[in-house]
Image (spheres, helix red, strand yellow):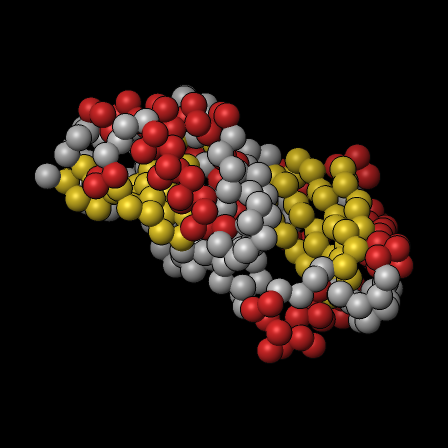
Amino acid sequence: MKWVALLLLTLTPFCLKAQEEEVHSLYFEFDKYSLKENQTIALLEFVKKLDTTTIETIEIFGYCDDRGKDKYNFKLSTNRANTVKEKLVSEGIKNKIIITIEGKGRILIDDDLLDNIPEVRSKNRRVDVVVNYKPIIIENLKIPGVYSSIPKKPIVGDRIYLDKLLFDRGSSKLLYPAKKELDRLVKQLYKFKNIEFEIQGHVCCTPKFHKEAIDRGTKKRELSVNRALEVYKYLSIKKIKKERMSYKGYGNSQPLGKGPLLDRRVEIVITKVD
């Protein structure tokens, strides 16, 4: 899939960055925390592909299905996380970059997935290895159509890419630095009164059978929509006319084509230029 043209806004005015994240999941048998041969092979293949010089931190999270008591499930999920950690260390991953080893306990089943409980439970008996990479400078990628501000002659299809770290994982709440960056965008939108745009929310790192992620604030599967809506509301408060704007959540349906690393994002896409 081709990269889409991006118009990038980040927290730093001169150095355009995005924090990369990659998630690798290993699935366990019911009530087990030992790795089977195929799981070990999959983990080792994952490790071989890692460029350890670019890794900033690793986090390991263990989970269980919804059966059993909480105390037992926390212990089981922690054992699963520790098993994976020990295997990673044995394969040369340095202890000091593994900053989190946490058992999360059981995952409750969503009401919208009740038609496939066995499969859902099997997916919930897992460990997620979250690899956080050092920031990359997006402008160095030299993607055609990438800008640090609205171009002098904007055209339909130009994009403002709001760095995915404007949001905490699972959250649609705008952080203070994000609001400051949006304030910079607002000044540009005051100048370019002739453009209309769509605010597009996206998510990454969800299983393929989840087209959308859960917003931990509402407990509903609407994260990309809510992220787009938060930007819409903020721009409205800043006196950007609502008739110039629309918003939509795209879930995980429009990855950039470079894996999930840059897909937790909000884009502002120019839809009309008068």
Q: Position of residue 184 (x, y in %)?
A: 35, 23
Is residue 26 shown above or below 189? Answer: below
Q: Position of residue 241 (x, y in %)?
A: 23, 34
Name the residue nearer the viewer: 217 or 96: 217
Q: Position of residue 177 (x, y in %)?
A: 49, 25
Quadrant of the image for the N terminus? bottom left
Residue under the image location 43 percent in, 50 percent down: 225
Name the residue nearer the viewer: 22 or 200: 200
Residue under the image location 71 percent in, 60 percent down: 107
Quadrant of the image for the C terminus? top left
Residue occupying the far left of the picture = 274
Is residue 227 shown above or below 110? Answer: above
Is residue 107 shown above or below 186? Answer: below
Q: Tell me if 71 is positioned left or right of 117 in this view.
A: right
Q: Position of residue 21 (x, y in %)?
A: 59, 44
Is residue 165 shown above or below 252? Answer: above
Q: Tell me if 122 is positioned left or right of 138 in this view.
A: right
Q: Tell me if 158 is positioned left or right of 266 in this view.
A: left
- Residue 115 visible in the displayed image: yes
Residue under the image location 28 percent in, 22 percent down: 187
- Residue 20 visible in the displayed image: no
Q: Tell me if 250 is positioned left or right of 19 in this view.
A: left
Name the residue nearer the viewer: 11 or 37: 11
Residue under the image location 28 percent in, 46 percent down: 246
**For residue 5, what is the image quadrant?**
top left
Question: How many marks are shown on the rendered structure?
Answer: 0
